[in-house]
Amino acid sequence: MTDRNRHVKIIERVSTRLKLKQLRLLVAIAEHSSILHAADEIHISQPAATKLLKDLETDFNVKLFDRTNRGVVPTEFGRALVRHGKLILAQISHAAQELDDLNEGLGGRVVVGTLLTASAQLLPNVIKVLHEQRPNISIVVRDGTNDFLMPLLHSGELDMVVGRLAEYRYREELTQEVLYHEEVVIVCRRQHPLARAASVAFDKLAQCDWILPPRQTTLRRQIDKEFFDRGLHSPSNPVECVSFLTNRSLLLATDMIGVFPVHVVQNEIANGELAVIKCKLNISESPVGISYRREDALSPAATAFLAQLRMQSAELATGRA
């Protein structure tokens, strides 16, 4: 009963005493590791910021920040409140943006994170169709790897992330939906000595210069495991890059080889710029899908985007896209 009463009191404090300015201050302190810089960001004096923080710690009866030689850093309690504060502020910002967009006739706004596997074909297809259906919709695309995009999704700065599904550590409080499974291929320029070989042994590829995904990606770990399982060392000095424009230029200008989801390079393969190296990989097909917080929390624009993702991925999976 005591725990229940304490929980009720905490909820009452949050609903009646927590101010948005305090949340903005908390997030700013966590980002700057400085009360002074946080105060400057939200346009209040340092004494006022210190008092706001002290009032908040008194209300919750916890210490939210520690002073260290690295500046002011959040405690466990502080990290929890900052995480929820970011989500609350992001939702308020999204609500204001959606009202403004609707008022101006823009048809709403969706912010999407994308990984390499979705950026080449799936996402452009979705955006093309959605703009034809809803010409006033506003779409923002941010690209990167899961370790960059998933925290933005958790904090509410992204509506969804599209690409190879994130590993288990990112999945808490998220819905993940598989759209299709993607094959990966090793490619090189068509003039490469290995391009015309009927079959290439994997150990021969170990002698090549590679372009690989960053170490924190699922595909990179799969490639490293492929080398390990065959008793080989992973490439010692690969180029690590997620920009396909950069990777494509490198492949066309050098004898480097790279591993990519097949949909990313299929146009270059079809027009003869790149060739698939005929080497059997033990890498299993990986699920490509969508990650989002909750479908009922999505805006109308994001819901329409999600529906179009499902439709376009179904066509892509059956080879009609």
Image (cartoon, helix red, strand yellow):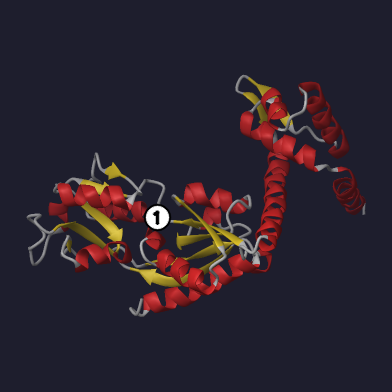
Confirm whether residue 192 shows in the render.
yes
Viewer-side residue, 138 vs 154: 138
Quadrant of image for the C terminus: bottom left
Residue 9 vertical position relative to residue 320 in the rendered view, above or below: above
**Picture residue at 72% right of the left edge, 50% below the top:** 88
Question: Residue 20's spot in the image, x, y percent?
Answer: 79, 43
Q: In this view, does 38 lie to the left or right of 255?
A: right
Confirm whether residue 287 shows in the render.
no
Question: Residue 213's spot in the image, x, y percent?
Answer: 33, 50
Which SS class for mark 1?
helix
Residue 36 vertical position relative to residue 85 in the rendered view, above or below: above
Question: Residue 54's spot in the image, x, y percent?
Answer: 83, 29
Q: Give the tally of numbered discs.
A: 1
Determine the image quadrant of residue 31: top right
Q: What residue type is labelled 1?
A: Thr
**Picture residue at 36% right of the left edge, 46% below the top:** 214
Quadrant of image for the N terminus: bottom right
Q: Is residue 248 left or right of residue 156?
A: left
Q: In this view, does 86 lie to the left or right of 162?
A: right
Question: Residue 183's spot in the image, x, y percent?
Answer: 31, 67
Viewer-side residue, 67 vs 119: 119
Determine the image quadrant of residue 235: top left
Q: Please give the residue where the numbered disc 1 appears in the rendered image.
A: 218
Residue 256 vertical position relative to residue 55 in the rendered view, above or below: below
Dot 1 crowding, Cα within 10 Å, few <14, some 14–19, many 20+:
some
Determine the image quadrant of residue 295: bottom right
Identify the residue at the far front of this view: 104
**Picture residue at 79% right of the left edge, 25% below the top:** 50
